[in-house]
Amino acid sequence: MIEISGLRKAYRGKGRRDHEVVAVDGVDLTIGEGDVFGVLGRSGAGKSTLLRCVNMLERPDAGTVSVGGVELTTLSRRRLRQARHGIGMIHQHFALLSSRTVAGNVAFALEVTGVPRAERRTRVAELLELVGLSERADAYPGQLSGGQKQRVGIARALAARPKVLLSDEATSALDPETTDSILRLLLDLNRRLGLTILLITHEMTVVKRICRSAAVMRDGRFVESGPVAELLHRPGSELARDLFPLDDFTTVPGQTVIDVSVSGEDADAPLLTEVARELDIDVRVLSGSVETLAAGRAGRWRLGVPGDGAAAIHHLRSRGAVVTLPEEKP
Ligand SMILES: Nc1ncnc2c1ncn2[C@@H]1O[C@H](COP(=O)(O)OP(=O)(O)OP(=O)(O)O)[C@@H](O)[C@H]1O
């Protein structure tokens, strides 16, 4: 649904001596229809620029961006305006018109695409129903909670029935409970409408709850990218480390410390008691957890096993677990 190849975008300072900042530095990305893809990264990594290049709010310097099979970088202004109707966008600070009611804000998105008044009224009612805000149609943004404002933002973004939704830190300004309800709504829309979602975030909760695929961005590049379940197993994965942080035990006298990751059915198998029983050894759980992610059940532990650990490592690997030593780097 979204194909990005060799994307580059640099900003030049205004003065002659100002050097160039390369915000996106050669990103390739493929997002399948109906996927929920999260891009994570620290402030300044280039996430917003990447997202804004997907609907051409920023013109890339090089590379191609195609959405739903339409290559956007070569379109005329008029064709690009049309193509943008197929790409909705929601924002961290909602970007609502304060002088218009909830219904008026959603209707605005239809007015600009020339939808006739009667049709607009029906569609606005449908959209408010979809996001659970029918009761607040006549309220003004100033009278709404943050979560309700984001629901208006979502209804507005979906007005033209886009197949793709871009989310720019949509839950960063919300408290954890409200974040949860917005993420549930996004997941529900993804399932019911087959909506493909590309989001940028710095919150691990967002990745845990709704992303099936993800990328970690640094200095304008993707340092890792792929299905979350696969990234969790990649030695040295930053995503795995951030999703399942492990305490800093790297040595235990008389034991070897190992990191073990599991996913799918293996996450709930009695793997640790089994290895202890079958090898007749003590296994110490130093840190770790098993959780339900949007990408499935997954877990990661840091364990202490006796001696050089060879027998335990062999046994765990034979049961499908990925085992690495904590000091191993990618
Ligand atoms: N309009 C602009 N003009 C000049 N430099 C810019 C512009 N927009 C972004 N940059 C620079 O490009 C780099 C990437 O910025 P970008 O906003 O894409 O990162 P980000 O990962 O989204 O960060 P944040 O999470 O803080 O929004 C930064 O160094 C930033 O200062």
Image: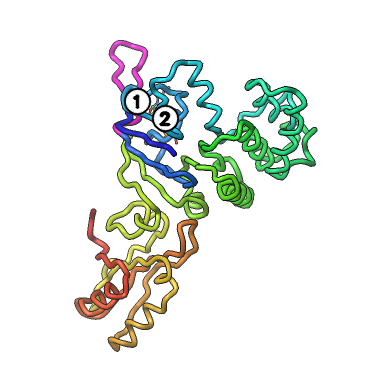
Q: Which amino acid, by three-letter code, is at mark 1?
A: Lys
Question: How is this picture coloured?
Answer: rainbow
Q: Is residue 16 magenta?
A: yes
Query: Residue at point 37% right, 13% down?
Result: 14
Position of 236 with respect to 93 (left or right) is: left
User: In front here: 264 or 68?
Assistant: 68
Q: Which amino acid, by three-letter code, is at mark 2?
A: Thr
Q: CA distance from mark 1 to mark 2?
A: 8 Å
Q: Residues within 10 Å of mark 2 (few under 14, many from 20)?
A: many
Residue 227 in the image: x percent, y percent? 38, 52
Q: Determine the secondary structure under disc 2.
A: helix
User: In front here: 209 or 86?
Assistant: 86
Query: Residue at point 55% right, 33% down?
Result: 89
Q: Are marks 1 and 2 in contact (CB under 8 Å)?
A: yes
The residue indicated by pointer 2 is: 49
In the image, is residue 284 above or below residue 116? below
In the rendered image, which quarter is residue 140 located in?
Answer: top right
Residue 270 shows which numbered tag?
Answer: none
Position of 121 with respect to 30 (left or right) is: right
Q: Is residue 27 magenta?
A: no
Q: Determine the secondary structure under disc 1.
A: strand
Q: Is mark 2 within 8 Å of ligand 1?
A: yes
Query: Residue at point 73% right, 37% down?
Result: 144
Residue 92 in the image: x percent, y percent? 56, 36
Q: What count of labels does the image hold?
A: 2
Q: Which residues are magenta?
A: 9-26
In the rendered image, which quarter is residue 126 located in?
Answer: top right
The residue indicated by pointer 1 is: 9
**Farthest-out residue, top:** 16
**Which is nearer the N-term, disc 1 or disc 2?**
1
Ligand 1 picture quarter: top left
Query: Residue at point 27% right, 75% down?
Result: 318
